[in-house]
Image (cartoon, rainbow, N blue to C red):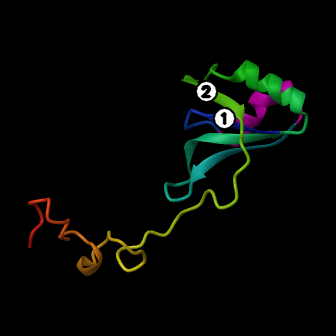
Amino acid sequence: MNIYVGNLNWGMTSDDLHNLFAPYGEVASAKIVTDKFNNNRSKGFGFVEMGDDDAARKAISELNETEVSGRKIVVNESAPRQEGEGGYKKKTFGGGRSGGGGFNRDRGGYNRNRGEGNSYNRY
């Protein structure tokens, strides 16, 4: 079972996370998510993987909303990522989509005519 652990102290390491869950059963992996653009600083959440679902459920029920390193942590079962979720989406400015937005005024940019009922943006 994959477990989400949130609201972690930024000083907590993956080893600390592993040691937190070890009393409940075998921990296959424990990883704190870090920000690679900010000196690998913790993002305040991580994931723990446990092979035994019963041990994982016990760990979730006993650790959720407990205080660890001065923070009340959130622990729950991690939902599997759906196809197409996650990652970054490329934002288009103008020409990529129809119907407006962006900087291209001909296609509905910032000073577009919004119809006769409105008295603003009439340039």
Residue 110 is left or right of residue 81, and the answer is left
Question: Which quadrant would the C terminus be assigned to in this image?
Answer: bottom left
Q: Position of residue 79 (x, y in %)?
A: 71, 42
- The answer to the question of whether label 2 and label 1 lie on touching residues, with beta carbons closer than 8 A, is yes
Q: Secondary structure at mark 1?
A: strand
| Residue under the image location 83 percent in, 30 percent down | 56
Q: Residue at x 75, y 26 (%)?
A: 60
Region of the chain picked out in magenta, as a range? 13-26
Res 1 → quadrant: top right
Residue found at the far front of this picture: 116
Q: Is residue 16 above or below residue 97?
A: above
- Does 67 sit left or right of 92 as displayed? right
User: Which residue bears the numbered disc 1?
Assistant: 5
Q: Is residue 24 magenta?
A: yes
Residue 2 picture location, percent across and down: 78, 41
- Identified by mark 1, the residue type is Val
C-alpha gap between disc 2 and disc 1: 7 Å
Where residue 62 appears, as percent x and y from the top left, is 74, 18
Q: Name the main secondary structure of what is drawn in magenta.
A: helix
Nearest the eye: 86 or 101 = 101
Q: Residue at x 70, y 51 (%)?
A: 81
Identified by mark 2, the residue type is: Ile
Q: Secondary structure at mark 2?
A: loop
State the residue in front, 95 or 29: 95
Residue located beneath label 2 in the image: 73
